Image (tube, rainbow, N blue to C red):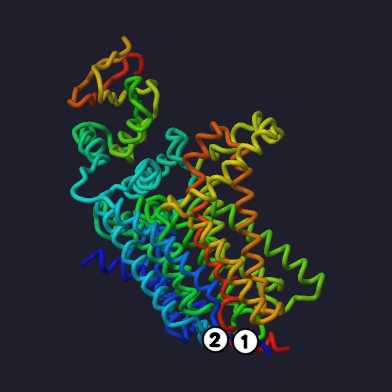
Amino acid sequence: MVPGLAALQCFGLGLAIVSTGWTRAASPAEKMLKFFLSAGYGLGAFSILYLVLRVVGGASLLSMDVVALALFLVAWLLTGRLLPAATVSPAADDDSPGWLRGSITAGFAAGLCAALYSAVRRTIAYPNGEGWDAFAIWNLHARFLFRGGAGWREGFSGFIPWSHPDYPLLLPAAIAHFWSYVGHETYAVPATIGLVFTIATVGVLFSALLILRGRNVAMLGGLALMATPSFIEQGTSQYADIPLSFFILATVVMLCLSDASVGASLPPPGWIALAGLAAGFAAWTKNEGLLFFCSLLFSGFWMLAGGQRVGETGETLARPRSFLLLVVAALPILLIILWFKRVIAPPGDLFVYSATTFHQLSDLARYAAIGKWFGKQFFRFGHWLWVPGSLLVVGIFPAFRHWGAQNRGDRVAAGQQTGFRVCVAALTITLCGYFVIYVITPYAVYWHLRFSLNRLFLQLWPSAIFLCFLRIGIVGSKLRPSERSQNEV
Amino acid sequence: MPRKNRDFPARLAIAVLILVCGCLLSSARLVLEAPRGHIPDEIARRSDLRFAGLKAALPTEGVVGYTGSSADSIGYYYLAQYALAPLVLDHSLNHPLIVGNFPFAAPQLPANLEVLRDFGNGVLLLASKDEP
């Protein structure tokens, strides 16, 4: 009973936050997207509330949650009146033959069943998670928060270096929040949170593509993610990589939706704010999320400056107001991260050996070795059977492009694409950042690559699938009315 | 005006089918490699259950020392830390109370350590003679 009510409270809080930024969901696909986004935003908010309570003390957790929920409900009502409702005209399906549509549907259904079966079996088999990081980092930090009383900060001292005490606390604090409601520790909480993030990531990918590119493209994109064995394995391992991939994807989706919004002359401020909030939650999940956030800011700023130069300031992030809104939405979370890094956590392990860093940066053989490993890992990171999913996703692009060029000519317009371009740039910069981290790592580089690169690729994989299928959809499916009108001009 | 697409090209259909079939191969791997039957919870056995007795004998918070055998990997240290949190285990002997973790063999303790209590399974509570 209590866990169910806590889950309801968490989801309700997430729904109130998402609905504050997205006041009206017109189509079933939009409602579905809001549903899956709410699950992740709720968990993010739960972690922030728990940490604030831990620091401030005094109030009860339940009363704090109720007040936060009430505040967001009021905000929802206010924004519903003040902000213009933003929506996206749903995409029509391509005119593919019935047998092909049936094949895609059957494949998607089979992939969904396989992914759910595997995820549930793994969750039951490994209640403490699978692998080192689950207990030595994330659940250990959750225990320090939950059991620690007034002295919880000691758990984040430099005495336990391999537990990475500088890692942000979204996952541990969300787990501790639920344990506080239940009254004791239970393995079911981290296991369920892992499962929820895994399912929600697939849900966000599927429903966003459903809105923007239609049913067939959505099923292909969803299948590509669900059929990535590493994605399911990591999602149920109680690591933070899949939660991070969720928030990166949520950021990317909200920015690309802003590109496609109709009925408003300006980019919907609520959607930009939700993107900023998701990017903030990404930074609060893992240090790599902080890198993604910085990459997003850099890309946004770059687009802002470039847009003003070439006079394209009508587009999503090429407006100073949109850019500022993105930053402001993430600001409360960034302040908490700043406080945590400055006051609680010791310095990160990757930046402590400055004497060797310069030598490593000037070692060209190191770049070549890391580049080679990146290349190999591109085909391997998903633990696919025989055919790499990365190759499948990239490989289908030329076929669709050829078809699009044949059938529509080369002037295939896609409407505003600033959000899309910002996301591609942000993910590319993040990937480059990962590369640089390996260059300067104080650990043996092959050991570091071997045990982490596949997870880093997985963090970006759902967003990469989304962006790739978004492009495929532009050339492969019927244009939405808004796109069609632009194409006809 | 965009041309209406009436004939879906076979080439594109083949590309889509290759994608679906390729994905389903990996979906099959997910099903085939899914864990079946009862798998003993190793982390709980090597962590919470093993250190339950020691936990009751230690203070609930603060910092204590830690030592283990050379064969004791860093993993065993973290299993102990996981069980005993929020008590912090400092991997050093410079503390009045020290947790001894020797899962594989009888410990070879330094002369300045004395065993306060043996909890079995290689779990020891030690005291430093040098520390006040």
What label sits on residue A97 in the rendered view? none
Q: Please rate how many residues cluster around mark 2, counting C-alpha atoms within 10 Å: few if below 14, some from 14 to 19, many from 20.
A: some
Residue A205 in view (yes/no): no
Question: Residue at image x 36%, y 51%?
Answer: A238
Query: Could you tell me the amino acid type at mark 2?
Result: Ser
Q: Which chain carries label 1?
A: A
Please say if A466 is above or below A34. above
- The kind of residue on which mark 1 rests is Ser
The quadrant holding residue B67 is top left
- Label 2 sits on a secondary structure element that is loop
Residue A377 in view, yes or no? yes
Place residue B24 in its image quadrant: bottom left
> Which residue appears at 69% of the width and 76% of the height?
A315
Mark 1 surroundings: few (<14), some (14-19) or many (≥20) residues within 10 A: some
Residue at image location 51% in from the left, 60% down from the top: A392
Against B86, residue A170 (above or below) is below
Q: Earlier in the sequence, mark 1 or mark 2?
A: 2
Q: x, y percentage for residue A329?
A: 57, 67
User: With A418 as the anchor, is A32 left or right in this view?
Assistant: left
Identify the residue at the far top of this view.
B111
Q: Name the residue under label 2.
A: A89
Residue to which mark 1 is pinned: A482
Q: Is residue B33 above or below residue A256?
A: above
B47 shown above or below A231 = above
Query: Viewer-proximal residue, A415 or A472?
Result: A472
What x and y, as percent, mark residue B85? 32, 40
Q: Where is residue A168 in the image (x, y as percent from the top left)?
A: 48, 50
Q: Is residue A399 left or right of residue A1?
A: right
Q: Residue furthest front?
A: B10
